[in-house]
Image (cartoon, helix red, strand yellow):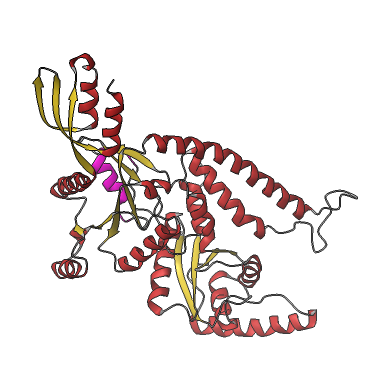
Amino acid sequence: MSPKKPSINAVLVGVQTQETSDLDLDSSLAELGRLAKTLGVNVISQITQKRDRIDAAVLGQGKRFELARLTGGNGVIPRGPLAQRQKIEENAELAMADLLAEFGEPEQLANLVIVDAELTPAQIRNLSQAVGVEVTDRTGIIVDIFHRHASTREARLQVEIARLKYLAPRMRASGGPTERQAGKGAGESNLELDRRKVRDRIAELNKELAVIEGEASVRRSRRKDTLRVALVGYTNAGKSSWMRLLTTSSVLVEDKLFATLDTTVRALFPKVTPQILISDTVGFIQRLPHDLVASFRSTLEEAKEASLLLHVVDASDANFELQLAVTREVLGEIGALEGHSMLVLNKIDRCDTERRQMLRERYPDAIQISANEPDDVQRLHGIIAQDFERLLDDLTFVVPYSQSALIGEVHKRARVVSETFEDDGVHYELKIATTDAERLQRMLK
């Protein structure tokens, strides 16, 4: 029997600056808690503070002591002359004693602190010294989740590049204050050598990724003339559930953030003619790290090139409008915001009558549906098929009997409105996409 893994208990830390409201902070911390839970981390407490800005210490002295009580640290960032540090530590002991007298010993100590911000290496080091346990930030947690959930070769490469870019500036020297030299006369410290190895590894991964992205680009170009729908939206909004229902594919569906990182493309089912392809995409989140957005830019090309964006939102989430804004912001970054789209208010079965009415008034053109309702699955299938009528042209087409092999292509690429057999060949009235019409015309000898 394998030994039980020690539990990771964390304290969440939120700093409210002038740019954030109470609502923004509460929403962001709640989301950070869900991110931690996705990694199997047990959140035992949270601490917040209002500050003008996040400085080198991250928190003010009083809040550092409050945090240190929950981690077993002393709340002190060791700096300055020895005598000054000793005096600070003595005062810290008195302050900690007062805190313990007032609030008592915590039931359990945290062994991780997660700060709801992107911290510099110095800020992480300072706070870690003060609390005596590992400190990470929002970006670090998201990168870890991506690293754990990536399954395809492309996604693993993308995430590893982002992870190394995140870790490189946070690497610390292992050889003490003077940093041991890699070798006599080498002129390069161990830390510099390690960082150069990381840069070389990133360059190597980028080369591998370029090859894979080139292959993916070829596959996308082959689908260029196909009618395509891209499911986009906030993480855990229900995109993968709809991908599975609309295509009968066995994509992963989990109640976790970032359960899907890999783009999946399947045909709409029951099938329609011309064929419509559905693609699922990576979910978005508040302050998604820039390197991850950049890494997944190729994957998100599916959204940019789609004929229809289905913007899936969890209508039951109190913060869905913020999530809607975040998704639009990321789509804007990749140049996909101007495409034809529909707003899908998902999980509507979790909304009461009053909320549904409010949503109808605020978003009159949105589709209110639930993945748990079979009728809604049929309804969305019909809405998608009907929407693509705008892209189909009317075409009269004659296939001479001498080219009867073309009849199969006609039925594959177009919806046949009428089919009659005349002396000069088979006469068709078709509904067909422009590119497919041009292809059929070229096939006529």
Q: Position of residue 114 (x, y in %)?
A: 52, 65
* Residue 268 in view: yes
Q: Position of residue 173 (x, y in %)?
A: 74, 58
In the rendered structure, the answer to whether residue 332 lies left or right of residue 414 reads right
Which image quarter: residue 325? bottom left
* Residue 6 in view: no
Q: Is residue 286 above or below residue 270?
A: below
Total count of labels: 0
Question: Camera-side residue: 167 or 48?
Answer: 167
Q: Quadrant of the C terminus?
A: top left
Question: Camera-side residue: 272 or 323?
Answer: 272
In the rendered structure, the answer to whether residue 80 lies left or right of residue 322 reads right
- Look at the image and say whether residue 243 sits in the magenta stretch: yes
Q: Position of residue 237 (x, y in %)?
A: 31, 56
- Look at the image and say whether residue 54 sits in the magenta stretch: no
The residue at the point 54 percent across, 75 percent down is 67
Q: Position of residue 246 (x, y in %)?
A: 24, 42
Instruction: Point out the stretch of residues depicted in magenta.
Output: 237-251
Q: Is residue 53 above or below residue 417?
A: below
